[in-house]
Amino acid sequence: MNKYIKEMRMHHYVKNLLVLLPVFFSGRFFSRESIVHALFAFLAFCFVSSAVYVLNDIRDAEKDRLHPKKKSRPIASGNISMKRAWLLFGVIVVLCAACNMAVFSPWGTAIIILYFLLNVFYSAGIKNIPIADICILVSGFVLRVMYGAIVTDCTVSNWLYLMITVISFYLALGKRRGELRLGGKTRNVLCFYTHEFLDKNMYMFLAMANIFYALWSADSAGVKAAHPRLLVWTVPAVILLSLRYSFDIESESDADPVDVIMRDKVLIGFGICYAVTMCAIFYL
């Protein structure tokens, strides 16, 4: 069972928490109907992301066997046969479809399909095109929020959408920067990027993210919180989180967002404190 869990990359499910943001910021997080819909949406995105990982590993199995790190993946290493890999892919797709049907929406279904197709195209060649590869990674984060908003019938502030978009650019550029620092041999597209280009643009996007967050928090009239005027005081906390994350990716790592967060207990502690504060502001 462990090999199937590893193949599905369940530790990356933390990214899918973005699906829950719309219902949280709408003030309906403790509404039974809203949270049930949000949880089904979360599971649907978990399964579709796992389906993408499995499909990619099936297609790249031969190449992964020559990679020093990827050769240990269950399919590449032979721990999961091709027949069982395709069976796993089919089961995951069925589970995704079932969760999506539980909260069915034509636009929501279109987003799930779009997410899957974009990732297939990414693996098929877009990942080797500079800038385009970054845009695909960013679209995955934004589509998660859009899907959560649609299936829960929640409205997301334009400032919040802008903040999520630019912070996603920062995370994606930071990941490429980390990969380049480790030698630049893991991806063909890295030969098109330079440290200077990635540094300048990632910190431009980080500054924009903090500005958009500040503008959203200052828009007390458009925020459905119990104490909207207190939101502006969370801006220093977000800046602190940004500083800590930047501090981490300056170290010797590949800057994968999930790995960076999971390895830094201080960053996790800051994040928990921020989450508790936001719950108090929105619901107490």
Image (cartoon, helix red, strand yellow):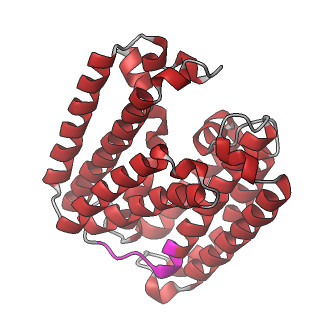
Percent x, y of residue 108: 25, 63
Q: Position of residue 58 (x, y in %)?
A: 39, 27
Outermost right residue? 196
**In what quadrant of the picture does the C terminus appear?**
bottom left
Residue visible at 34% across and 13% down in the picture? 81
The furthest residue to the top: 79
| Front residue (pair 80, 97) | 80
Foreground of the two, 10 or 197: 197
Query: Which image quarter: residue 179?
Result: top right
Q: Is residue 189 visible?
A: yes
Left or right of 239? Residue 86 is left
Left or right, 185 with reference to 227: right
Q: Is residue 56 left or right of residue 39?
A: right
The number of discs equals 0
Residue 252 position (above or below residue 234):
above
What is the span of residues highlighted in magenta in the rendered image? 154-161
Q: Is residue 233 magenta?
A: no
At x 31% / y 61%, what residue is drawn? 111
Tell me if 8 is positioned left or right of 160 in this view.
Answer: left
In the depicted structure, whether residue 67 falls above or below residue 154: above
User: Residue 70 placed where, x, y %?
Assistant: 57, 23
- Relative image position of residue 225 (x, y in whole percent): 43, 75
Quadrant for the N terminus, please: top left
Please tell me which residue is depicted at 78% across the width and 35% down the height of the picture: 182
In the image, 78 versus 161, the foreground residue is 78
Asked if residue 245 can be seen in this view, the reply is: no
Q: Quadrant of residue 144?
A: bottom left
- Compared with 18, 233 (above or below) is below
Image point (48%, 33%), residue name: 11
